[in-house]
Image (cartoon, grey):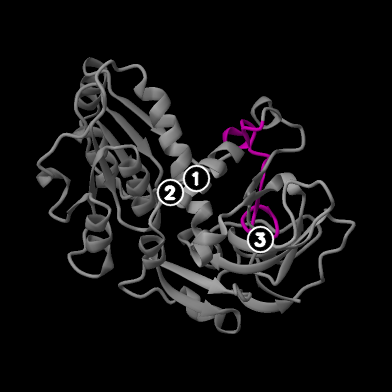
Amino acid sequence: MRAVTVLPQKANSLELSDVPEPTEADVDVLVDVLAVGICGTDAEIIAGEYGEAPPGHDRLVLGHESLGRVRQAPSGADVAEGDLVACIVRCPDPVPCANCAAGQWDMCSNGRYTEHGIKGLDGFMRERYRSSADRLVRVDSALGLAGVLMEPTSIVAKAWAEIDRFAERDAEKQKIALVTGAGPVGLLAALLGVQRGLEVHVLDQVTDGPKPDLVRDLGAHYHSDGIENLGVHPDIAVECTGVAPLVLGSIEVVRPNGITCLTGVSSPGRTKQVDLGGLNRALVLENNLVFGSVNANRSHWKAAARALRAADRGWLERLLTHRVPLDDVRRAFDRGADDVKVVLQIGDLS
């Protein structure tokens, strides 16, 4: 069968390869891949920045944002033939550490976890794969192709779950949230903020294209004049860019007792003068909390499924700005100025 593969840590080694069919000896549920979302992680792996092939293999099948349909499943499994599913990306380490043993592989403490399409496990840019049923999460069939948003939604579902937990320390109810970045993760973070009844403000640098309207059609507020001109002091900030000035700005802009969640991964090498003493003083005296969040466990994937099911399908479909067939995979990485989420369409959804 066909698959999109790379030689990990070798730049520009992307190719459409022939790979072996998954065998029943692997795991018990056979899934036909319908679509895979493209994200910055895929581009960084293609650029040779990181990535790890499965043991004994030279090439890695790319792709971690999956939507598939179950072709075969054993009787009594949690999924059945015809179900739309997404596959959980991270798998626990083999030891396992205390967190992985408790099903919190997103909090793996020894770094020996594996991740489909990223680290030690083949991804989903292939025509079929096999998985154990407990690694699959059902996707509402009414979502159609928008079900491919499950993985990025799981990321922000985890972030919001952590925010909700930390917010319990404050007797005053949080009202205003800031999301920095209006890419797929930022827009989905804004969606979950709106679903929580918050007044949501989204900051990005573009002034045209689909992003401002997508934010406004959520009932949120769009800003493009810089964080210093936001005009509000949020209770919560969710930073989704990894851009150093916005990381710092998100920490500084929240009100006393505020919470800043960092989800964007910054590139090293950029320097900026910061008054660490002043920042520390403000954080301590204002009881502010800053934390990082990465990946998601099964509870977050289920929360993502609920959030997408409750969202407007038309709005979700507008996030899918570019659809590319498998035969033309290289074009999927030619990101246009107005693209939000590019989708590699592999199977027939009808």
Q: Secondary structure at mark 1?
A: helix
> Taking 197 as reference, is 231 left or right?
left
User: Tag 1: Cα neighbours inside 10 Å, few (<14), some, or many (≥20)?
Assistant: some
- Res 306 label: 1
> Taking 159 as reference, is 119 left or right?
right
Can you tell which quarter of the image residue 127 is in?
bottom right
Residue tagged by mark 2? Answer: 310
Q: Are marks 1 and 2 in contact (CB under 8 Å)?
A: yes
User: How far from the left and from the top, in percent, is residue 267?
Assistant: 40, 51
**Identity of the amino acid at label 1?**
Arg
Q: Nearer the viewer, residue 139 or 282?
A: 139
Rendered-image quadrant of the C terminus: bottom right
Residue 78 in the magenta stretch? The answer is: no
Range of residues picked out in magenta: 103-123
Q: Secondary structure at mark 2?
A: helix
- Given this view, does label 2 or label 3 mark the residue nearer the observer? 2
Tell me the CA gap for discs 1 and 2.
6 Å
Residue tagged by mark 3? Answer: 123
Tell me the CA gap for discs 3 and 1.
24 Å
Figure check: 180 above or below 255 = below
